């Protein structure tokens, strides 16, 4: 059944890819200055990409060469290109620019076809080259102070600037803006609970320990509003603790101290939902996910007393724990946003994992700083 | 805010490492001990080390080690007895070493465990095993009597005796026909020995002296010219002539008090007379003459099967 499902998925994927390629070619078009609109096939030559394109209506036709003075617009590989007269240090010139779509009406963002990091902003028929003062240009273009926090984290990339313009175009009310990708080193104090079976008995021990934790939270926003994110949160912890239990086994009474000292490498993958409390200042979050933990037992001991009539036998044993655990992770917290998208994060992270009959739970109170 | 972050970063490590919990022990009523290792195994014994993790709340009266052959230990339902090295009193430190010096046979595997005794409770550590290379030779320091025949029991003191009575063997060369020795109790430092008289030695003197040879599992201790031979007897009597009803007082050569002591007349004849003796003090005893035919009779002393004739006759006078 699984094999069939896999084969079916692969076939569907191949058909999708193949059809996408066909559609891309069929949908390519060219708009000449005399407004003739023709669907067909387009070819770009990088050596003359700013000035020339090649077009044919069918595959049997030879390529026809068009200059940027003849072509007003063309559509190639799901991207629109426009012929624009621009100024970029070598006097005014006519070149093809690639449109970077955004949702702010009346404002177009273009990328140069021959230089990847050269952008142009067009508003009300005027087009200008963006340089290091691009934030000021964007601020004046949108004229919305509520977007200043977003502008601080808008980098000189087509994606960032288009996102900023789209936010301006769809702005309804203030909300917290966060970077698409974030890294948050954190540290905290932890409480751990190890449950395991005492050797040679049916008795379960529950050792509660305390310790510290260091880690890094790597996040990527997965929706346009950037309030849902995916997190990979590797951490290294160290804890130790003990437990005293009294039990009967095989007719004898036992009183046992269990002690362990451990280091834990945890790798959780989780989804986080953010909720604005005060836009661009306070934001709460909750997360759930799945994780694995590697436990390295540094030290372990059982101080066992076997109590019989008139005598006690005492001995000390060490014990082993499984190394790999997996299970649920979750957490809650609050983010205090600072400038440039940075934030101080305080939260509680919880994990409950198992490995056979052994169980491991870790609760951490952490402080992090998001860059 | 920068200052806050600075403080946070500097304080966090202190908070974190303060969270680590050291190995701890939950105090209990009883002592908690941990067997460590057995070392210094040589021809004179072996040493076990153990730690007192917690002394408990009851005063410790003694501590030591129990050990036994592994083959014996592994027999079903084995519950002892163990060989024991025990030290009276409270231990002076938490780390203790006890030397096992007796009953170890070279090449034999043993198991050993430490113990601590407090009021009505013995706490044992874990068993450790080792292969012995031998134990110390016995040493005799003191014997409770140097006259064989005088006592039913003698006590031999010294060191490194076998704790198992059957592993101690006593021989007195030259007296094998007259005495045999049975070890009633044994410890590392003393032997309680029953001296059985096979037959009485008719002639003996203080000049004839005999060696004591103690053999403990092949190792010997010899005390040269220790023993002479002698039997309980009358040394002095207040009169050799008396009437029925008269009091008779005797002084005895005797090393130990017995319940049934008699002076006898004609003991080796069918109608002998046995007069029970009552102690007056020291080795002086009294009795009263009961009815018996007048005339001279052989006087003797009888004590638990030992009969010794007095060199002079005793005469009963008419009333």
Image (tube, coloured by chain):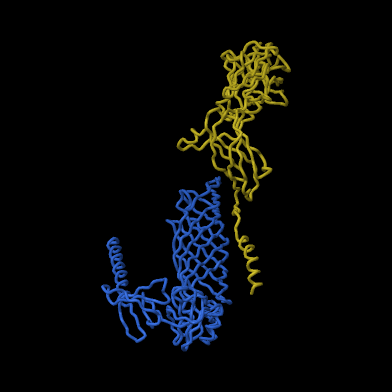
In this view of the protein, can residue B287 be seen by the observer? Answer: no
Chain A, which colour?
Answer: blue
Of residues B22 and B137, the one drawn nearer to the viewer in this rendering: B22
The answer to which of B40 and B136 lies nearer the viewer is B40
The x and y percentages for residue A276 are 51, 80
One can see residue B204 in this view: yes
What is the total number of numbered labels drawn onto the structure image? 0
Chain B's colour? yellow
Query: In this rendering, would A22 be left or right of B215?
Result: left
Instruction: In the rendered view, tell whether residue A298 sits above or below residue B67.
Output: below
Quarter where residue B202 is shown: top right
Q: Residue at x 49, y 62 (%)?
A: A361
Vertical placement of residue A156 versus A255, above or below = below
For residue B61, which quarter of the picture?
top right
Looking at this view, is B290 or A170 the one in front?
A170
In the image as oriented, which residue stretches furthest toward the left? Answer: A60
User: Can you give x and y, in whole percent of width and height, for residue B211 in the image?
Assistant: 65, 17
Q: Position of residue B177 (x, y in %)?
A: 58, 14
Q: Residue B21: image x %, image y %?
A: 60, 57
Residue at image location 35% in from the left, 83% down from the top: A32
In the rendered image, which quarter contains the C terminus of chain B? top right
Q: Is residue B251 left or right of residue A240?
A: right
Q: Nearer the viewer, residue A20 or B75?
A: A20
- Residue B249 against residue A182 in the figure, above or below: above
Which residue lies at the image location 63% right of the left edge and 61% below the top edge?
B18
């Amino acid at each position: 059944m699984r094999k069939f499902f896999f084969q079916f998925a692969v076939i569907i994927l191949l058909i999708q890819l193949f059809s996408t390629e066909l559609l891309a070619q069929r949908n390519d078009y060219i708009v000449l200055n005399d407004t003739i609109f023709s669907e067909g096939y387009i070819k770009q030559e990088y050596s003359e990409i700013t000035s020339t394109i090649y077009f044919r209506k069918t595959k049997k036709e030879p390529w026809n060469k068009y200059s940027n003075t003849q072509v007003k617009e063309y559509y190639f590989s799901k991207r629109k290109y426009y012929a624009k007269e621009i100024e970029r240090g070598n006097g005014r010139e006519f070149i093809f620019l690639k449109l970077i779509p955004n949702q702010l009406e009346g404002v177009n963002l273009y990328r140069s076809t021959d230089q990847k990091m050269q952008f142009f902003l067009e508003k009300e028929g005027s087009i200008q080259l963006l340089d290091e003062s691009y934030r000021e240009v964007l601020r004046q273009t949108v004229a919305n102070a509520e977007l200043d926090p977003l502008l601080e984290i808008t980098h000189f990339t087509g994606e960032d600037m288009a996102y900023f313009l789209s936010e301006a175009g769809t702005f309804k009310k203030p909300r917290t803006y966060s970077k698409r990708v974030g890294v948050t080193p954190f540290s905290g104090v932890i409480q751990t609970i190890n449950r395991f079976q005492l050797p040679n008995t049916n008795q379960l021990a529950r050792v509660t320990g305390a310790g510290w934790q260091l880690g890094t939270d790597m996040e990527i926003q997965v929706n346009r509003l950037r309030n849902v994110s995916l997190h990979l949160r590797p951490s290294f912890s160290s804890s130790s603790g003990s437990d005293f239990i009294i039990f009967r086994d095989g007719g004898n009474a036992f009183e046992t101290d269990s002690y362990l000292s451990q280091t834990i490498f945890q790798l959780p993958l989780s989804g986080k939902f953010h909720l604005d409390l005060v836009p661009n200042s306070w934001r709460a979050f909750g997360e759930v996910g799945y994780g694995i933990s590697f436990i390295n037992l540094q030290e372990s001991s059982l101080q066992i007393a076997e109590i019989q009539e008139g005598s006690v036998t005492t001995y000390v044993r060490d014990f082993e724990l499984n190394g790999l655990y997996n299970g649920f992770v979750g957490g809650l917290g609050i983010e205090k946003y600072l400038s440039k998208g940075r934030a101080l994060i305080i939260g509680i992270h919880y994990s409950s994992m198992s490995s056979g009959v052994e169980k491991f739970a870790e609760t951490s109170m952490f402080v992090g700083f998001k860059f | 805010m920068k200052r806050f972050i600075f403080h946070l970063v500097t304080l966090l490590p202190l908070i974190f490492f303060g969270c680590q919990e050291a190995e701890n022990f939950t105090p209990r009523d009883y002592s908690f001990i941990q067997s460590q290792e057995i070392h210094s195994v040589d021809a004179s014994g072996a040493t076990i080390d153990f730690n007192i993790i917690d002394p408990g709340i009851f005063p410790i009266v003694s501590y030591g080690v129990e050990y036994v052959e592994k083959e014996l230990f592994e027999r079903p339902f084995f519950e002892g007895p163990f060989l024991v090295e025990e030290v009276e009193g409270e231990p002076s430190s938490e780390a203790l070493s006890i030397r096992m010096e007796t009953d170890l046979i070279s090449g034999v595997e043993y198991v050993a465990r430490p113990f601590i005794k407090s009021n009505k409770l013995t706490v044992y550590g874990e068993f450790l095993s080792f292969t012995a290379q031998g134990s110390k030779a016995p040493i005799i320091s003191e014997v409770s009597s140097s006259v064989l025949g005088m006592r039913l029991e003698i006590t031999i003191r010294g060191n490194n005796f076998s704790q198992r009575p059957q592993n101690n063997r006593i021989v007195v060369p030259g007296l094998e026909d007259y005495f045999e020795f049975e070890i009633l109790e044994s410890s590392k430092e003393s032997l309680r020995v029953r001296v059985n008289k096979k037959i009485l030695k008719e002639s003996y003197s203080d000049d004839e002296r005999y060696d004591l040879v103690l053999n403990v599992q092949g190792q010997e201790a010899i005390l040269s010219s220790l023993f002479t031979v002698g039997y309980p007897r009358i040394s002095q009597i207040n009169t050799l002539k008396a009437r029925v009803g008269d009091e008779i007082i005797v002084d005895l050569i005797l090393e130990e008090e017995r319940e049934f002591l008699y002076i006898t007349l004609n003991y080796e004849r069918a109608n002998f007379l046995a007069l029970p003796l009552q102690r007056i003090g020291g080795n002086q005893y009294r009795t009263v003459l009961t009815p018996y035919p007048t005339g001279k009779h052989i006087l003797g002393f009888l004590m638990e099967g030992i009969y010794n004739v007095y060199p002079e006759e005793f005469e009963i006078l008419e009333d």
